[in-house]
């Protein structure tokens, strides 16, 4: 954490895709901070820039301009060693389509980030057992992804994103490919991880059901953040969900117009 107490600082990020005559301005100057232990949601309609933003933070793509700081350090200025550490241990990534390797078992998929970056395996095994118990995936650790349900796959992917004890988990529409029941279970687990382990999570989603589990939500449209909603202390997920729907109705005469 830096001296201002911020874990992540996104400063005036712009991202253009394409060239001269065919430029898409996906992000038009996005700025926000994340405090340690926050569960921040970013909501916006399809094409609003959510994945682009997450990918800039994950260093999957480079912003056209602007900076991202983690613990006060500019991630764009990292050398290759710092960058490998950042990608391998400081951030965990949870994708909509799970991104599990088909020919590896659940356990092998979860431990993969560690085998790439080198770790103490006794410690890793303890952590694996803890996560598998908590995420209710013990019985699929020896199965391959094709033998798992969607919900199980995503909870295996969640374990993989947490195994290296990252400073922040980045989640891109993690419930997008799940049925309602599995989506709710995953979100309950993420909320518990946030509350009990004080884990910082940044999740993008267009789904109010998913973002109602967050502690704060930023709303993005056409590459610009235009609104913020904070969950009140002790406000239930159900109440927060109602407030999100009310806001969406005020903003656009119904969620269909905004999201
Ligand atoms: N590689 C690319 N090349 C050109 N344009 C792109 C590229 N990736 C995204 N875009 C464009 O940038 C804009 C933002 O896309 P982005 O994927 O970030 O939106 P999103 O909010 O995540 O959408 P969705 O919810 O549909 O995933 C869109 O207009 C999209 O068409």
Image (tube, rainbow, N blue to C red):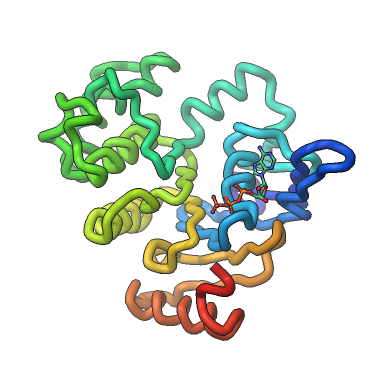
At x 80%, y 42%, the residue is 65
**Is residue 22 among the parts visible in the rendering?**
yes
| Percent coordinates x, y for residue 234 in the rendering | 36, 76
Residue 130 image offset from top left, x and y in percent = 21, 37
Q: Is residue 80 left or right of residue 136?
A: right
Please state which of residues 187 and 118 is positioned toward the viewer in this rendering.
187
Question: Where in the figure is residue 165, as x and y percent of width and height?
Answer: 39, 35
Picture residue at 82% right of the left edge, 43% below the top: 22
Extreme-left residue of the structure: 139
- The reply to whether residue 5 is in sight is no
Q: Where does the C terminus fall, quadrant-wise? A: bottom right
- Kindly indicate the quadrant of the structure image that contains residue 136: top left
Q: Residue furthest right?
A: 20
> Which residue is at a point 30% across and 51% down the rendered structure image?
178
Residue 31 relative to residue 179: left or right: right
Q: Residue at x 33, y 36 (%)?
A: 157
Residue 192: quadrant of the picture: bottom left
Looking at the picture, does residue 214 appear above or below residue 82?
below
**Closer to the camera in the image, 47 or 193:** 47
Q: Nearer the viewer, residue 96 or 217?
A: 96
């Amino acid at each position: 954490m830096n001296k201002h107490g911020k874990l992540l600082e996104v400063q005036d990020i712009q991202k253009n895709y394409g060239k001269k005559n065919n430029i898409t301005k996906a992000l038009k100057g996005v700025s926000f901070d994340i405090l340690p232990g926050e569960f921040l949601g970013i909501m916006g309609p399809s094409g609003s820039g959510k994945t682009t933003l997450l990918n800039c933070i994950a260093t999957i793509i480079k912003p056209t301009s602007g900076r991202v700081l983690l613990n006060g350090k500019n991630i764009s200025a990292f050398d290759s060693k710092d960058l490998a550490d950042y990608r391998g241990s400081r951030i965990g990534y949870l994708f909509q389509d799970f991104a599990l390797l088909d020919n590896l078992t659940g356990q092998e998929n979860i431990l993969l980030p560690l085998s790439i970056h080198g770790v103490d395996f006794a410690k890793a095994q303890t952590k694996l057992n803890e996560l598998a118990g908590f995420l209710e995936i013990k019985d699929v650790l020896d199965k391959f992804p094709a033998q798992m349900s969607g919900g199980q796959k995503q909870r295996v992917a969640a374990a993989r994103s947490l195994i290296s004890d990252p400073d922040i988990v980045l989640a891109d529409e993690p419930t997008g490919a799940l049925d309602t029941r599995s989506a709710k279970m995953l979100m309950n687990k993420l909320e518990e991880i946030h509350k009990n382990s004080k884990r910082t999570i940044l999740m993008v989603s267009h789904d109010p059901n998913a973002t109602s589990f967050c502690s704060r939500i930023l709303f993005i449209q056409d590459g610009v953040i235009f609104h913020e909603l904070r969950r009140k202390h002790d406000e239930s997920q159900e109440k927060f969900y109602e407030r999100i729907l009310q806001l969406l109705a005020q903003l656009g005469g119904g969620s269909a117009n905004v999201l």
